[in-house]
């Protein structure tokens, strides 16, 4: 994921790729009622209220090779966007 962000930044003049934080799907935030629930082994539904709006974001985790039990976020998506697609060339 970091390599995709770096590559996308190199394609822009300002170095800015996204105008929001993909972990929460927003630029401004005041989170309440934060909950994470596993959907399956590697997918989590992240639910919270941000500035009064209920939000659900899906985090797809990838286990690090050579480090059992250590995971990184492989993709993040909602019903309207997917981070890997936003960062695609």
Image: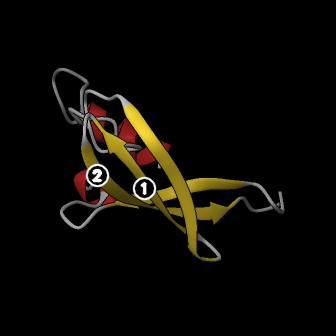
Q: Is residue 77 visible?
A: yes
Query: Separation of disc 2 and disc 1 at Cα?
Result: 7 Å
Disc 2 residue crowd, few under 14, some 14–19, many 20+, Cα 10 Å: few
From the image, tell me which residue sits under label 1: 47
Q: Secondary structure at mark 1?
A: strand
Foreground residue, 51 or 77? Answer: 51
Q: Do the residues under discs 2 and 1 have CB atoms within 8 angstroms?
A: yes
Q: Is residue 89 visible?
A: no
Foreground residue, 45 or 18? Answer: 45
| Residue ID at (23%, 53%) | 86
| Residue ID at (37%, 43%) | 24
Q: Secondary structure at mark 2?
A: strand
Q: Which mark is residue 54?
A: 2
| Residue ID at (60%, 71%) | 42
Instruction: Point out residue 88 in the picture as x, y percentages from the top left corner.
Output: 26, 56
Foreground residue, 13 or 16? Answer: 16
Instruction: Point out residue 59 in the picture as x, y percentages from the top left corner.
Output: 47, 60
Earlier-in-chain disc, 2 versus 1: 1
């Amino acid at each position: 994921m970091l390599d995709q962000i770096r590559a996308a930044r190199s394609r822009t003049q300002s170095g800015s790729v996204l105008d929001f934080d993909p972990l929460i799907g927003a630029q401004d935030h005041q989170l309440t009622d934060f909950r994470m629930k596993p959907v399956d082994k590697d997918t989590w539904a992240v639910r919270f209220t941000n500035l009064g709006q209920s939000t659900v974001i899906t985090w797809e985790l990838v286990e690090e090779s050579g480090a059992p039990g250590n995971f990184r976020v492989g993709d993040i998506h909602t019903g309207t966007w997917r981070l890997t697609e936003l960062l695609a060339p």
